[in-house]
Image (tube, rainbow, N blue to C red):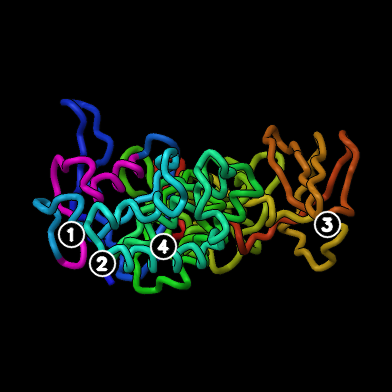
């Protein structure tokens, strides 16, 4: 088992393009961590730095307590899987999987045994005699994983391995990677993706990146329930979070968020943190799945109710998305398939005020912590 440690790592290309900026991160031994962020945020560069494919500008990287600064690529006990498979199309599947071991002069019997074991685990034994041109995209990606697997590395680096696969194959390969994870509990995984849903379903912990730096690190429920700022709140989650601007005001019975056209009451556990913002503008964030149709929520408190005008309805199997407008704001609610108001119709909604988020409009940081 090998812990990966990055300390104050930066990578600057030329004299001005900073791909990674002062990143400090620890991936625990045997952990499956996901780096997630938009294209160009530096996540792939971090993988390349760990693998030794790019040189550090500043900072240090260690694996298993051993600093990597002078360690050549082939001695790092790392296997990396890229977005695009890099199979040799003139070799069979078995030969592709064995290629790295043969270069390292492993005995042929040991090489054949490892290839057979990896093929069985990945359920590609029947493909060993085929060539890559005879395989589907998903099968080629399995072979790529198998080629890395036979090396039995301390660290697996996966750079968006599902990016160029269609949805059905993506789900299949995602399941394959989970299977690998179960069988390789002593191996450390660092997985890169731009897909927040993929990150949430794959990662034991997630590091959210933006513009070369790490914004927040945590387990999926922590990032979802306690985003550190509006960027994380917007990025993490199946559906886009709704943001509404308004002021914190004091009423007779409680504090309220006053949007101008409507107001909703603040629950007691949030009051103390929001009291310093009395009379000031804040940003309220609420996820579509935390907004309900009042018709189906009989015990919704009066201070949580808002009336919106339905703009249009999207039916997606078990979920219906209501696109609404209230007080000049457009937002979205996720409701059940039975709930389909007509465009232009008023809809009485209940906000789950125990699940809302509040952010400072200047810093964009969470007020609730």
Identify residue for label 2: 3
Q: In the image, which residues are magenta?
A: 42-65
Identify residue for label 3: 294
Q: Secondary structure at mark 4?
A: helix
- Ranked by sequence position, the earlier of labels 3 and 4 is 4
Outermost residue on the top side: it is 15
Identify residue for label 1: 62
Q: Secondary structure at mark 2?
A: loop
C-alpha distance separating marks 3 and 2: 50 Å
At 50% from the left edge and 44% from the top edge, which residue is drawn? 131
Which of discs 2 and 4 lies nearer the camera? The answer is: 4
Identify residue for label 4: 115
Q: Nearer the viewer, residue 190 or 51?
A: 51
C-alpha distance separating marks 3 and 4: 59 Å
C-alpha distance separating marks 2 and 4: 27 Å
Left or right of 39: which side holds 68?
Answer: left
Is 267 located above or below residue 138 in the figure?
below
């Amino acid at each position: 088992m090998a812990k990966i440690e990055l300390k104050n790592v930066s990578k600057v290309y030329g004299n001005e393009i900073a791909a990674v900026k002062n990143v400090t991160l620890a991936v625990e031994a045997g952990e499956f961590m996901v780096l997630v962020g938009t294209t160009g945020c530096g996540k792939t560069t971090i993988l390349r730095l760990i693998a030794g494919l790019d040189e550090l500008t500043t900072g240090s990287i260690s694996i298993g307590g051993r600093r990597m600064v002078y360690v050549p690529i082939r001695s790092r006990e790392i296997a990396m899987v890229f977005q695009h498979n890099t199979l040799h199309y003139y070799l069979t599947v078995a030969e592709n999987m064995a290629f790295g071991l043969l270069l390292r002069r492993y005995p042929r019997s040991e090489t054949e045994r490892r290839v057979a074991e990896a093929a069985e685990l990945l359920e590609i034994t029947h493909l060993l005699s085929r060539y890559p041109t005879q395989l589907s995209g998903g099968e080629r990606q399995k072979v790529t994983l198998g080629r890395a697997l036979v090396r039995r590395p301390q660290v697996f680096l996966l750079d968006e391995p599902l990016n160029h696969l269609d949805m059905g194959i993506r789900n299949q390969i995602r399941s394959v990677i989970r299977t690998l994870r179960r069988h390789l509990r002593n191996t450390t995984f660092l997985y890169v993706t731009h897909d927040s849903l993929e990150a949430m379903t794959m990662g034991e912990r997630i590091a959210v990146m933006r513009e070369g730096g790490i914004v927040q690190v945590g387990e999926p429920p922590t990032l979802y329930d306690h985003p550190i700022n509006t960027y994380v709140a917007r990025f993490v989650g199946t559906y886009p979070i709704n943001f509404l601007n308004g002021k914190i005001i004091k009423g007779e019975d409680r504090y309220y968020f006053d949007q101008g056209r409507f107001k909703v009451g603040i629950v007691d556990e949030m009051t103390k943190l929001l009291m310093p913002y009395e009379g000031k503008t804040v940003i309220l964030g609420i996820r579509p799945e935390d907004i309900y149709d009042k018709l189906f929520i009989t015990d919704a408190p009066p201070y949580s109710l808002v009336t919106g005008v339905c703009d249009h309805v999207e039916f997606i199997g078990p979920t219906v998305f209501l696109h609404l407008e209230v007080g000049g704001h457009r937002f979205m609610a996720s409701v059940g398939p039975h709930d389909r108001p007509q465009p232009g119709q008023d809809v009485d909604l209940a906000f789950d005020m125990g699940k809302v988020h509040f952010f400072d409009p200047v810093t964009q940081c969470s007020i609730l912590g």
